[in-house]
Image: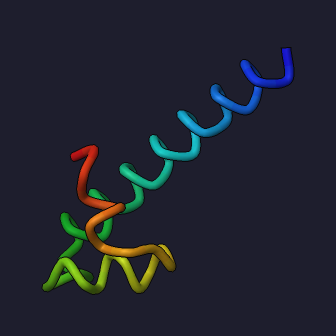
Amino acid sequence: MLGIKKYILSILGNQKEKLQMLSWIKSGQLQEQQEIGKRLAKDTSEVLKPI
């Protein structure tokens, strides 16, 4: 049961990150993909794979 909960929370977290990235891009706050990684404190390749 704990594994399912962790999986669901990871999916929700990914969705929140995607929405945040889209918000930044649409508002013009981001100009380069490296900025996304910096803002989310993740490697850029890790962040952009699911898009």
Residue 7, located in which quarter of the rendered image?
A: top right
Q: Residue at x 26, y 67 (%)?
A: 45
User: Measured from the top left, where is residue 32 in percent x and y?
Assistant: 15, 84
Q: Quadrant of the N terminus?
A: top right
User: Measured from the top left, where is residue 3 in percent x and y?
Assistant: 76, 24
| Above or below, comparing residue 28 to residue 5 in the picture | below
Q: Quick one: which residue is furthest to the top in this view?
A: 1
Q: How many numbered badges does the structure rendering display? A: 0
Residue 23, located in which quarter of the rendered image?
A: bottom left
Q: Nearer the viewer, residue 8 or 18?
A: 8
Q: Quick one: which residue is furthest to the left in this view?
A: 31
Residue 46, located in which quarter of the rendered image?
A: bottom left
User: Measured from the top left, where is residue 44 in percent x and y?
Assistant: 30, 73
Q: Residue at x 27, y 57 (%)?
A: 22
Q: Nearer the viewer, residue 32 or 42?
A: 42
- Say whether residue 3 is left or right of residue 26: right
Q: Residue at x 34, y 61 (%)?
A: 47
